[in-house]
Image: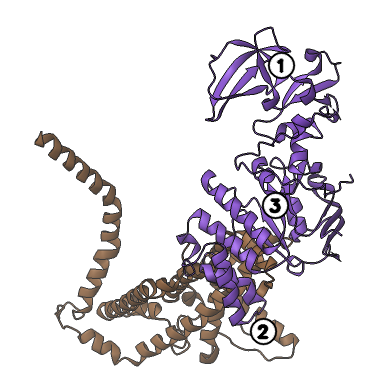
Amino acid sequence: MTDAFTLERRRRALHGWLLLSPALIMLATFAFYPSLATVITSLWSRGTRRNPAEFIGLENYRYLFDDPTFWQVVSNNLFYAAVTIPVSMALALVMALWANARIPARSFIRTAYFTPTVLPMIAAANLWLFFYTPSFGILNQIGALFGAGPVNWLGQPDTALWAICVMTIWKEAGFFMVFYLAALQTIPPDLQEAAEIEGASRWTYTRRIVLPLLMPTTLFILVNAMINSVKLIDHLFILTKGGPSDSSKLILYYIWENAFAFFDRPSAAAMTVLVLLLLGALAAFQFLVLDRRVHYR
Amino acid sequence: MSFLTLDGVTRQWKGQGGVQGISLALPRGEFLSILGPSGCGKSTLLRLIAGLEQPQAGRIVIDGRDVTALPASARNLSMVFQSYALFPHLSVAENVIFGLKVRRVGRAEREQRLAEVLTMTGLDGLERRKPSELSGGQRQRVALARAAVAERPLCLMDEPLSNLDARLRHSVRRDIRDLARKLGLTVVYVTHDQGEAMSLSNTVVLMQDGRVEQVGTPSDLYSRPATTFAAQFIGEPPMSLIEGPALGYPDEVTVGIRPENVRLAAAGGGDLDTVVADIEFLGGDTRLELDQSAARGLAVMLPGAAHIGIGETVGVTIPEENRLLFNSVTGKLEKEPQQNPKARNRQIPAPEDGQKAPPSPKTVKEDL
């Protein structure tokens, strides 16, 4: 009797593990192990043939904090996030509200807004390289019509990071718009009619009903935008390579440089760990604190 | 002087659906039901009155003011939606006073009106709940409270009970009527349930295919249906229709008879011989469904339990004085039941509620 029972229980357990294993194996191989390895690497010195790597504790981190370029890159990235996230989200919301309204050529507008997202980042960056090119780039040609002198948008420290921001906003807003659009379409039209009968203006309806109902989406987009502000660097390779004089260098690009251009893997690992910690803290804050204030249906 | 007047209102989509040339007049304080099968245009008509749709032709006048071109917010009316349309992120109290806040009603007055209306709808103690934490009946009450707190003379209701179970439907139905009476509201109520329409309203507008089929008091519609459509739509069970020749009438006549007027007789001893197709015991009485090649929906109500088996042949008598004669081509009523005071004074077995429709003068004119 017991045997059959035990057998059945084992069979079920096996079944469960089999179902779990694909995800478990993938995550372990490509997420958990690399993270752990990174942490370990960051605690060891850089090994050469003569000096094998040795355990140096937090030395790599101290070295990093003394590196002015690191702080420059961090402040660049904070600026980049502070500009691109709010602007692209606000744009996305406005575009979604517009594309959700009853207007002619609605599907054309939606497609047009979404196009930048479909383009590969590298292709988009090449496009913008042409916009930004001094003298015969589109921006300067338009400027010339109004008598403005040529500006080397990507070539001077004052404008390079702004140029990167503008391109990122262009790329991201359409993507976020799709989420807002999907959320808007789940709001029953009755609510607008009910508000209309109560005498609410379009603006009141948007502010009092639509925006609160979009909060879960906004939170989701915020998480994504924050991750993207650290993750998306493809365009740097085409547009500026972090220059001039590190003015447009973002943290992931700097990590890449350290790891694969300077072959300083421990520094790169230390920075990666810091980025992971920051993103982890952000995620925890968003899901534990902000989530409670958001209405989910 | 009528309070709500529709004059030749038409709204169609690509020449079909919608409503066509609807004209109505409704005095203040009346309870009007718009009744009809789904797709007959009754919701469209309500949305036209509300201002959520614009008519292509015709005029809508509310309280002596032509509102045809005015937006919904300027028409001074409230509305209860089929889906309730409660704001899911707002609490009960916030939902109810949403409109007052929008219209900048002072805080003290807002609170007072909220308290009043919550008591009236039995929602005391639920102020802080979100709609998702309420039962269907409670949500319905919130929707009613939101309409009531606006204190507007005209209230439109779009199938407000269709998402409730049968038991709740009864109690909320009573609440709606009480509320309307207490606040002196003029109500336009859309429903596809003839029981609701008959028990709630002073006047029923029966619609089919975007047109008005018949307008009248519930008892009018029950005892003098203008067409075979009305005869078969009103009443539970509906009127039975019998081909004229089976009862000795000419070909172009269809005879209508209410099941409660049909009498059983011995086989061969009545007007028609029929076969018992189904027996339904309803408690107080029993309904027999009868099969007859010349009749549609023939049934008879017997008091108490019946001692007849399915498949037996029985005769039925169709009393002369209760027969309604319809033209079988046009479907129009040609001859009313003969004046028989006894028959006319019968109480209308008002569906479900046991509520007798209030006898009121014919208040709605129809000029199609």
Of the residues under marks 1 and 3, which one precedes in the sequence? 3
Give the number of the mark in front: 1 or 3.
Answer: 1
Quarter of the figure with residue B110: bottom right
Q: Dividing the image into 4 quarters, which one contains the C terminus of chain B?
A: top right
Chain at numbered mark 2: A
Please indicate, yes or no, whether residue B345 appears anywhere in the rendered image.
Answer: yes
Which residue lies under the disc numbered 2?
A140
Q: Nearer the viewer, residue B256 or B55?
A: B256
Q: Position of residue B224 (x, y in %)?
A: 79, 34
Q: Position of residue B200 (x, y in %)?
A: 67, 48
Crowding at mark 2 (Cα within 10 Å: few <14, some 14-19, many 20+): many
Instruction: Give the residue type at disc 2.
Output: Asn
Q: Secondary structure at mark 1?
A: strand
Q: Nearer the viewer, residue B115 or A289?
A: B115
Which residue lies under the disc numbered 1?
B317
Marks 3 and 2: same chain? no
Instruction: Give the residue type at disc 1.
Output: Thr
Chain at numbered mark 3: B
Instruction: Give the residue type at disc 3.
Output: Tyr
Between the C-alphas of marks 2 and 1, the distance is 97 Å
Which residue lies under the disc numbered 3?
B189
Q: Position of residue A163 (x, y in %)?
A: 55, 82
Marks 3 and 2 in Cβ contact (< 8 Å): no
* Colour applied to chain B: purple
Chain at numbered mark 1: B
Q: Is residue B40 left or right of residue B115?
A: right
Q: Secondary structure at mark 3?
A: strand
Between the C-alphas of marks 1 and 3, the distance is 38 Å
